[in-house]
Image (spheres, rainbow, N blue to C red):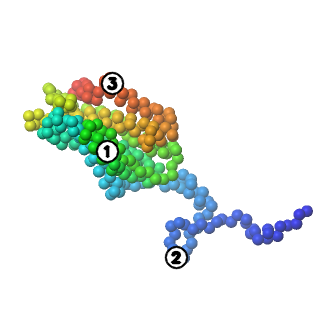
């Protein structure tokens, strides 16, 4: 029989004592030592011990985040205004006075119609991320804003990356997919609820009752005629842009390329990705191919109800 290893004499009765681990946030010089046991460590990684953020924290916006949202929204609205007047080429087509007045009136219209599509899309990401225990704040992209403004000014075409919600935290692939799809689903919700809202607004104001809305040389509705502001044109455009912008923005973000939401959604669940992608793709294709238009949709419903 083999003799007993003398090194066994140094082992305590309990060979696996509970380790003493100092808290990371314990203050220096503290006389009382904070200790975690093995059970405490296990509880840290269980769902029961994870505290969900309160609603106040979920909706909390830092000062720098508010500044970034304001900057991105202002730049986005300006770029949309340039697009509405056809960019620099519209200056020679419309004339300096009409171009300038239409631009100044288009900016608030676009802010009302497209602003919520952009802002609430980003807030959708933020809320779901924070509910999953992450840090999440919006940050504008100065170069993306500058590029979008310059492009729309010179070409009358808008392609802009205003910024994105920065997320930090450990999440599963499923949670990451939920965070990503929250933005496009927010746009889908805005499109759906936008139909009855704008039908009600346009129906009660009688915006469609104007016998003839003058058109500009670039094919858009005129906002000024004989020195008077045509508020009906502005209101109709706001409703039309609300519907079309939410569809286009939702579809664009669902493309599975680069940093877009579609990449993360597809990585999480391909069935969900294709379902949401087609929900946006079908009406957008139908809109561009002439099978339907937001203007006719709103006008037809207003005519039936009012």
Q: Where does the image place residue 35, in percent across and percent down from the top left?
A: 58, 67
Tell me which residue sits at (37%, 46%) in the image: 122
Residue 71 badge: none
CA neighbours of label 1 inside 10 A, class few (<14), some (14 to 19), many (20+): some
Observer-nearest residue: 265 or 35? 265
Q: Is residue 305 visible from the viewing direction of this image? A: no
Identity of the residue furthest to the top in this view? 291
CA neighbours of label 3 inside 10 A, class few (<14), some (14 to 19), many (20+): few
Nearer the observer: mark 3 or 1; the answer is: 1
Among the 4 quarters of the image, the one containing residue 42: bottom right
Q: Secondary structure at mark 1?
A: helix
Tag 2–tag 1 contact (CB < 8 Å): no
Marks 3 and 1, how far apart in space? Answer: 29 Å
- Residue indicated by mark 1: 147
Marks 2 and 1, how far apart in space? Answer: 54 Å
Tell me which residue sits at (15%, 29%) in the image: 214
Q: Secondary structure at mark 3?
A: loop
- Residue indicated by mark 2: 29
Among the 4 quarters of the image, the one containing residue 19: bottom right
- Residue indicated by mark 3: 289
> In what quadrant of the picture does the C terminus appear?
top left
Q: Which of the marked residues, 3 or 1, is nearer the chain's N terminus?
A: 1
For residue 259, side relative to residue 293 (left or right) = right
Q: Where does the image place residue 300, in percent across and percent down from the top left?
A: 25, 25
């Amino acid at each position: 029989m083999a003799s007993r290893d003398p090194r066994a004499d140094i082992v305590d009765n309990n060979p696996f004592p509970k380790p003493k681990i100092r808290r990371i946030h314990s203050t220096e010089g503290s006389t009382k030592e904070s200790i975690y046991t093995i059970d405490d460590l296990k509880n840290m990684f269980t769902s029961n011990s994870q505290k969900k953020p309160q609603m106040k924290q979920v909706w909390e916006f830092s000062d720098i985040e508010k500044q970034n949202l304001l900057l991105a929204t202002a730049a986005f609205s300006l770029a949309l205004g340039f697009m509405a007047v056809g960019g620099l080429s519209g200056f020679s087509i419309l004339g300096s006075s009409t171009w300038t007045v239409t631009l100044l009136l288009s900016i608030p219209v676009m802010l009302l119609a497209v602003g919520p599509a952009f802002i609430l899309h980003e807030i959708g990401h933020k809320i779901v991320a924070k509910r999953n225990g992450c840090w999440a704040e919006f940050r504008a992209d100065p170069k993306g804003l500058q590029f979008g403004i310059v492009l729309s000014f010179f070409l009358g075409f808008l392609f802009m990356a205003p910024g994105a919600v920065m997320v930090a935290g450990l999440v599963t692939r499923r949670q990451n997919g939920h965070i990503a799809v929250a933005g496009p689903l927010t746009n889908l919700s805005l499109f759906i609820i936008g139909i009855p809202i704008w039908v009600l607004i346009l129906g009660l104001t009688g915006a469609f009752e104007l016998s003839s809305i003058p058109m500009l040389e670039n094919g858009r509705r005129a906002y000024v005629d004989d020195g008077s502001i045509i508020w009906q044109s502005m209101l109709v455009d706001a409703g039309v842009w609300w519907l079309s912008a939410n569809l286009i923005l939702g579809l664009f973000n669902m493309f599975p390329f680069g940093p877009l939401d579609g990449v993360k959604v597809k990585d999480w669940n391909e069935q969900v990705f294709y379902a949401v992608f087609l929900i946006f793709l079908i009406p957008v294709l139908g809109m561009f191919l002439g099978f339907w238009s937001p203007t006719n949709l709103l006008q037809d419903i207003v005519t039936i109800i009012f």
